[in-house]
Amino acid sequence: MHEYFACFGLPGTFVLTWLMSLAAVIFAVIRRKNDAYLCAAAMVVSSCGDMFTTRFGRIAELFPNYLIIGASLFMVAHVLYTLSYRTLAKSKGFRYFNGGVITAIVLALACLVYFTVVCYQRNDFSMYVLCMLYLTVITLNCATVFSYAWSAVKKKPYLIFCAVGALSFFISDLLLGLEVLAGIYDYSFLVWWFYPIGQILLNVFAF
């Protein structure tokens, strides 16, 4: 990702994430809806999180716990997306609990089993509670967007893409969580492929 977007001496990840934030803000200003503003805020917070997780500039020196701060900012972004899509669903009179929510719960349970097995194999449960909190927050966003998509797709089939976006963002932050909280780096290279797709789809199809 670095080589594709690097310019003016800036890392490609930095350029890409702030281009996405700029696009999200412009889209929100055009739409002038609360849910769009919340999505834009989520993207901007995510970009701040990116600066920490990618150790932009001197962040690693100034903030020793930069990875934890970055992960926390992503949790805030997930909460903002949750509020955005819940606001959107309420405005359309959609029920919350449906097949989309059930799908997200099944996905979360599979991840829970995986986290538990990894901690058991390493005989290290020191970060287990934090892992569960992180998983709960990113699952809540996934469930809320899935719920909206499940109801909206009946009349607008293309809104399935917001669910694809939520899943992509979920996967990217799950991989980040594995790295930061569980010390598993095997899948880190995939984060910057799922992450942009997820964020773009969540913002473009929030209507």
Image (cartoon, grey):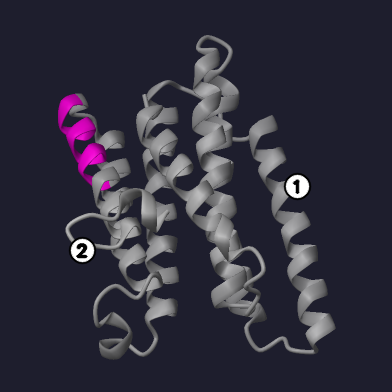
Q: CB under 8 Å between callouts 1 and 2?
A: no
| Residue kind at label 1, given as amino acid type | Val
Tell me if residue 183 comes above or below residue 197 in the rendering.
Answer: below
User: Magenta region's main secondary structure?
Assistant: helix
Q: Name the residue carrying label 1.
A: 106
What x and y, as percent, mark residue 73? 37, 66
Upstream in the sequence, badge 1 or badge 2? 2
| Residue kind at label 2, given as amino acid type | Gly
What x and y, as percent, mark residue 181? 58, 77
Tell me if residue 108 comes above or below residue 83 in the rendering.
Answer: below
Q: Which range is magenta?
A: 21-30
Q: Name the residue carrying label 2.
A: 9
Q: Is residue 27 magenta?
A: yes
Label at residue 92: none
Q: Is residue 168 magenta?
A: no
Q: Please name the residue shown 62% across and 70% down the image.
A: 178
